[in-house]
Structure formats: C-alpha cells, structure tokens
Image (spheres, rainbow, N blue to C red):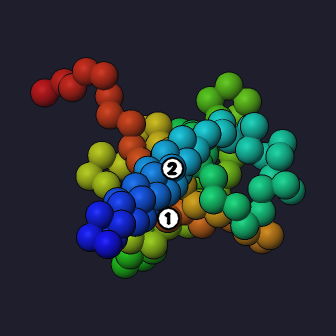
C-alpha cells in the first residue's frame, strides 16, 4: 500500500512539472512581429497576446503618471503603431530606441502593452 501511494504521488508530481514546463515554454516561445507585419494581419490578431518589435518615434512619448503613450515604427516600411502602457517604464526606454512590446491590440486601433522590453545598445559610450 505504501509503494502504491508513493508511485501515484510521483506520477502526479511528474504530470504537474511537465505541464508547468510546457506552458512556460509556449509563453516564452511567442514570435514577435515587425510593425508592418503586424498591421498586415491586425484583423486576425485582435485580443490575442502578441509581441511587436519597433523603434520609438521621436516626439511621440507622452507620460501622465503611470500611463505612457508612444508610437513605434518599422524602420524599413515606415508603418506606425500607437502604444499605451500602464506601469513603471524601463530606464533605457527613450526615443529612437528599439523596443519589443507585449500585449493585446484593441478594436480602437491601439496596442495595449503589458510589457516593454528595451533592446540595449551593443556599445555604451561615456
């Protein structure tokens, strides 16, 4: 009887760890779109969690408390996407920097970001 309980407990633990590993992998393996790619498929991406890569447009950054509004663009296509973000802003966030935003696209045409990932420059200058 004792070995049977140990075996059942081990199986349940194995299944739980497998499930957690799988969901972690799927969420971290999310592909990110360039702005122009995203806008080409925007109608199919409403209310889905997606990542979009772009460059912060100079002069578009407006912050009111913890609400940040800005626009990102695709360097090659010049397509733009308005972003709204609620929360603390990364220290390296500024105009002309590359960012990856993660969140959902609304039917109003605004990307509501949950996360902002800034890309660090390959070389820092004093």
**Residue plotted at (36% across, 66% down):** 4
Circle 2 packing at 10 Å, graded few (<14), some (14-19), many (20+), is few
Percent x, y of residue 24:
46, 52
**Vertical side of 77 occupied by 58: above or below:** below
**Residue plotted at (58% across, 61% down):** 103
**Residue plotted at (62% across, 29% down):** 75
Name the residue carrying label 2.
Answer: 22
**Which of the two marks, 1 or 2, is nearer to us in this view?**
2
Tag 2 secondary structure: helix
Q: Taking the image as drawn, is residue 72 in sight? A: no
Name the one closer to the observer, 32 or 95.
32
**Vertical side of 39 occupied by 115: above or below:** below
User: Which quarter of the rendered picture does the N terminus lie within?
Assistant: bottom left
Q: CA distance from mark 1 to mark 2?
A: 22 Å
Outermost residue, left side? 126
User: In which quarter of the view is residue 3 placed?
Assistant: bottom left
Percent x, y of residue 54:
57, 39
**Vertical side of 65 occupied by 59: above or below:** above
Q: Taking the image as drawn, is residue 19 in sight? A: yes
Name the one closer to the observer, 44 or 35.
44
Tag 1 secondary structure: strand
Please indicate whether residue 76 sits to the left or right of residue 83 in the image. Answer: right
User: In which quarter of the view is residue 97 placed?
Assistant: top left
Q: Which mark is residue 114?
A: 1
* Disc on the earlier residue, 1 or 2: 2
**Vertical side of 100 occupied by 71: above or below:** below
Please indicate whether residue 70 sits to the left or right of residue 75 in the image. Answer: left
Name the one closer to the observer, 126 or 5.
5
Percent x, y of residue 102:
54, 55
User: Which quarter of the rendered picture does the C terminus lie within?
Assistant: top left
């Amino acid at each position: 009887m004792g070995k049977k309980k140990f075996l059942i407990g081990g199986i349940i633990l194995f299944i739980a760890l497998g499930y957690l590993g799988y969901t972690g992998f799927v969420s971290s393996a999310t592909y990110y779109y360039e702005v122009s790619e995203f806008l080409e498929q925007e109608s199919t991406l409403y209310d889905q969690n997606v990542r979009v890569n772009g460059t912060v447009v100079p002069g578009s950054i407006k912050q009111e408390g913890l609400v940040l509004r800005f626009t990102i663009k695709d360097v090659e296509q010049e397509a733009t996407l308005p972003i709204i973000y609620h929360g603390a802003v990364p220290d390296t966030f500024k105009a002309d920097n590359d960012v990856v935003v993660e969140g959902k696209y609304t039917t109003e045409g605004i990307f509501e970001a949950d996360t902002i990932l800034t890309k660090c420059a390959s070389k820092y200058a004093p």
